[in-house]
Amino acid sequence: MNNTMRATLIWSLGAVIFSLVGVYIALNSNGVWYSIVSAVLVLLAGVTFAARAILSLRASDPNI
C-alpha cells in the first residue's frame, strides 16, 4: 500500500468517526446551546476530514 492510499484511508476513517460523533452529540443535545455548537464544530471537522480524503484520493490516481 503506497503512502497516498494510506493517507486516504486515515482521512476517511477520521471523517467517519467525527461525523458519527457529531451526529450522536446533535441527537442527544436536548436543545442545550453549547451541545448544538459542539455538534456543529465536530461535524465541520468531519467535513474537513472528508474533503482531505477526497483530495488525497484524487492525488493517488490522476485518472479520476
Image (cartoon, grey):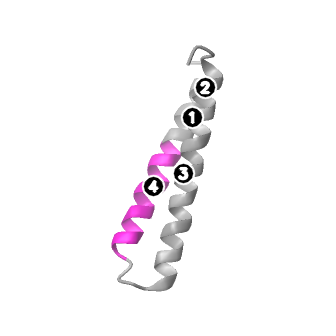
Please give the residue where the numbered disc 4 appears in the rendered image. Answer: 19
Q: What label does residue 58 carry, if any?
A: 2
Question: Neighbour class for label 4 at 10 Å: few (<14), some, many (≥20)?
Answer: many
User: Can you say whether 37 is above or below 63 in the image?
Assistant: below
Quarter of the figure with the N terminus: top right
Amino acid on which the number 1 mark rests in the picture: Ile
The residue pinned by badge 1 equals: 54
Q: Earlier in the sequence, mark 3 or mark 1?
A: 3
The percent position of residue 55, horizontal first and vertical second, equals 63, 33
Q: Amino acid at mark 4?
A: Ser
Disc 4 is placed on an element classified as helix
Can you say whether 26 is above or below 7 in the image? below
Q: Which residue is mark 3?
A: 47
Callouts 1 and 4 close, C-beta under 8 Å: no
Estimate the x, y position of residue 57 in percent, counting from the top left: 58, 27
In terms of secondary structure, where does tag 2 sit?
helix
N-terminal-most mark, 3 or 2: 3
Where is 62 relative to 28, above or below? above
Most prominent secondary structure in the magenta stretch? Answer: helix
CA–CA distance between discs 3 and 1?
Answer: 11 Å
Which residues fall within the magenta stretch? 13-28
- In the displayed structure image, the side of residue 9 where residue 59 appears, left or right: right
Point 43% across, 86% down: residue? 32
